[in-house]
């Protein structure tokens, strides 16, 4: 490449007006060992860019399939738990509630048990009534 | 889209993604983490983005946004790495040291650019993308990209001239 051309393109380059092709030719010019003295000050810049192009991503990328593989089982487990809780709550809420008549009957029943408990007090004393009937020395003779 | 085809497409730009992340973030390790995270996100959303025509550009945009988020959240440390590996086998030791220092200095100049200019310079000079692609990645107009690139290169040119003249401003 002619020196005059390089000077022209260098001015265009630093003004951001060169094409990719022109820029490639400039990089090619500055990567050779013989560079005109008037352009030596630009050499480190082009060398730095060329050096930068050689940096590579050396780590491995391993796609994380675990997440998607366990995603659906996790969703299913959570859904099952929610369903169990829902049905348990529903069973509690939807259990048949006693009607007013049933409540009244239960109250009556407990009252009757209470009355019966009092009436049965002393019932055991009635066990001697046969003994009184069998005695020969009767106070009141019916015959 | 088949998983294998998708992986091939995004892994084809992993080096570009890494270089952009390395330019913007503090260390190679952080850049690797950035690329791994973006690749994982792309993989998780494979079915959503498989329909895009430019998955590669989309991946680069994700890296750009990731880096900007990292920089904004100030999670990145202020330490900056200087890359010093350029030399020529035939050059003398003195010349090698000079070259290495000069190249390292250029990286320092590049680091001093605003984030947007730094990224555009990286995408154009290192990745050699055309203006249309850069505009898509940066979510800017082509005109804005050209202006930013011109500013970035001119800033570096001024610093090169200043360094060449041993720190004396020439006014050119």
Image (cartoon, rainbow, N blue to C red):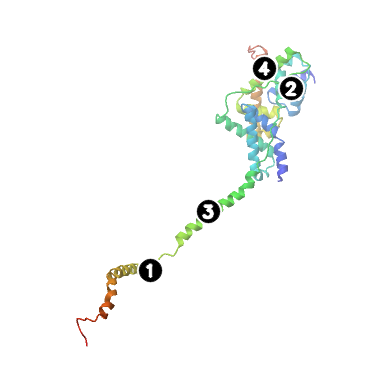
Q: Distance from label 1 to label 2 (Cα)?
A: 103 Å
Label 1: state its secondary structure.
helix
Depth check: give the residue in front, B133 or A111: A111
Which mark is nearer the camera, 4 or 2?
4
**If the image is split into quadrants, where does the C terminus of chain A sit?**
bottom left
Measure how far apart labels 2 and 3 are at the Cα level.
71 Å
The residues bearing labels 4 and 2 have C-alpha atoms spaced at a distance of: 17 Å
Say whether mark 2 and mark 1 are on the same chain. yes
Whole-percent x and y of residue B46? 66, 43
Mark 3–mark 4 CB contact (< 8 Å): no
Write down the residue under mark 1: A102
Q: Which label sits in the foreground, 1 or 4?
A: 1
Looking at the image, tell me whether mark 2 or mark 3 is earlier in sequence order.
2
Q: Residue furthest right?
A: A1
Residue at the (75%, 20%) spot, across then down: A30
Can residue B172 be seen here? The reply is: no
Disc 2 packing (10 Å; few <14; some 14–19; many ≥20): some
**How many labels were placed on the picture?**
4
Alpha carbon separation for disc pair 1 and 4: 101 Å
Marks 3 and 4, Cα distance to the nearest angstrom? 68 Å
Which residue is pictured at 38% across the width and 68% down the height?
A: A102
Q: Which mark is residue A82?
A: 3
Task: State the residue in front, B101 or A64.
Answer: A64
* Rendered image: mark on residue B160: 4
């Amino acid at each position: 490449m002619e020196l005059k051309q390089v000077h022209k393109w260098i001015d265009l380059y630093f003004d951001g007006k060169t094409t990719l092709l022109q820029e490639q030719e400039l990089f090619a010019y500055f990567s050779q060992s013989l560079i005109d003295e008037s352009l030596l000050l630009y050499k480190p810049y082009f060398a730095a860019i060329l050096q930068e192009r050689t940096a590579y991503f050396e780590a491995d990328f391993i796609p994380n399939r675990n997440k998607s593989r366990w995603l659906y089982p996790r969703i299913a487990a959570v859904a099952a738990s929610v369903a169990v809780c829902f049905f348990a709550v529903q069973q509690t809420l939807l259990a048949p509630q006693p009607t007013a008549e049933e409540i009244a009957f239960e109250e009556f029943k407990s009252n009757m048990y209470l009355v019966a408990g009092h009436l049965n007090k002393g019932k055991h004393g009635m066990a001697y009534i046969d003994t009184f009937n069998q005695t020969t020395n009767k106070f009141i003779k019916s015959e | 889209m088949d998983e294998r085809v998708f992986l091939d497409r995004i892994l084809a730009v992993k080096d570009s993604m890494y270089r952009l992340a390395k330019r913007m973030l503090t260390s190679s390790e952080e850049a690797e983490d950035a690329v791994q995270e973006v690749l994982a996100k792309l993989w998780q959303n494979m079915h959503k983005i498989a329909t895009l025509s430019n998955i590669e550009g989309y991946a680069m945009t994700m890296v750009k946004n990731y880096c900007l988020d990292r920089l904004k959240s100030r999670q990145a440390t202020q330490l900056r790495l200087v890359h010093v590996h350029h030399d020529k086998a035939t050059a003398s030791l003195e010349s090698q040291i000079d070259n290495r220092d000069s190249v390292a200095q250029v990286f320092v100049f590049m680091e001093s650019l605003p984030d947007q200019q730094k990224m555009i310079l990286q995408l154009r000079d290192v990745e050699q993308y055309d203006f249309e692609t850069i505009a898509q990645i940066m979510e800017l107009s082509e005109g804005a990209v050209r202006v930013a690139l011109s500013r970035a290169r001119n800033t570096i040119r001024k610093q090169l001239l200043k360094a060449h003249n041993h720190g004396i401003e020439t006014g050119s």
